[in-house]
Amino acid sequence: MNANPEKPVLISGNWKMNENHFEALRLVQELAALLHLPNGEKVLPDSVTVSVHPPFTSIRTVQTAIESDHVPVFLGAQNCHYIDKGAYTGEVSPDMLAKLGVQYVITGHSERREYFLETDEIVRKKTDAILRHGMHPILCVGETLEERNAGEAHKKVRTQLQAIFSGRSTEEALRVVVAYEPIWAIGTGMTATASDAEDMCAYIREEIGQLVGPEAADGIPIQYGGSANEQNSAELLSQKNINGLLVGGASLDAKKFVTICCSIR
């Protein structure tokens, strides 16, 4: 399978549990200033789409700022429940997010799987719910250091992909974004080499081809996530099968994040 030859790129900023609504507003305003030059010149390359994923308490604030300042980014969320409404104290439904104009929702992040014991079955239900409400899931898959050292990285990723893509139509699959996040590289400062990341992303594309078909395999964007930053973004994005980045800590710095968003070559 080959990556889309037009190389569309999706850069997503996962703010995690950071930025109260005052801080979130300031960050979006900083992004607006950096992405709107006084002479009207466009900053982002035409091939680049950007999403930002604030915590739930800041989504409405960020939505209003994006719309009022015409910031060229899409609103995202970090998680959702798979049921539209009901007695689920503390949860946020996909319907609520869709009504706020959310376009991308992260699902299956390793932190959700590890700390909140989310299984592949739960991630499948969340993916279905996100799609049902017209949003794009950003499906995270990846292995631990122990699994990688044991030679089981492909097996782990294959199992995660099968849980989500088995029985999925091509049309539906094409609305999913896959993010490869080697768990051992998240928040550790360690980063997979560009070659290692490319090898796994190529493998992911191949597996999607087996599960859904070549059209889906060629068209699905595959991001790399795992301590992506302004120093390594250009090299990662130059790889054939990497169509974007899921950025953590560096997305909290407007200048660094814009540099990452403009590093496609």
Image (spheres, rainbow, N blue to C red):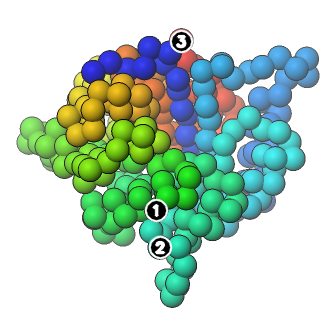
Left or right, 26 with respect to 226, comes to right
Instruction: State the SS at label 1.
Output: helix
Q: CA distance from mark 2 to mark 3?
A: 41 Å
Query: Amino acid type of disc 2?
Result: Ile
Which amino acid lies under the numbered mark 3 shown in the image of this protein? Arg
In percent of width and height, residue 247 lies at 51, 39
Instruction: Point out the residue furthest to the right here.
Output: 38
Local SS, label 3: loop
Q: Residues within 10 Å of mark 1 (few under 14, many from 20)?
A: many
Residue 212 x %, y % = 27, 38
Residue 225: image quadrant is: top left
Q: Residue at x 47, y 73 (%)?
A: 83
User: Which mark is drawn over residue 94?
Assistant: none
Name the quadrant containing residue 211: top left
User: Is 237 rendered above or below residue 63?
Assistant: above
Q: Residue at x 52, y 23 (%)?
A: 8
236 or 80: nearer the viewer: 80
In front of the other: 190 or 21 = 21
* Secondary-structure class at tag 2: loop
User: In the picture provided, is 8 more to the left or to the right than 220?
Assistant: right
Marks 1 and 2 sit apart, C-alpha to C-alpha, by 7 Å
| Marks 1 and 2 close (CB-CB < 8 Å) | yes
Q: Which residue is mark 3?
A: 265
**Residue ID for mark 2:** 83
Q: Which mark is residue 129?
A: 1
- 2 vs 3, front mark: 2
What residue is shown at x 74% (from left), y 61% (from top)?
Answer: 60
Q: Quadrant of the rendered structure where residue 34 is? A: top right
- Pointer 3 local density, CA inside 10 Å: few below 14, some 14–19, many at least 20: few
Three-letter residue code for mark 1: Ala
* For discs 1 and 3, the disc positioned in front in the rendered view: 1
Residue at coordinates 37% horizontally, 55% vertically from top-left?
108
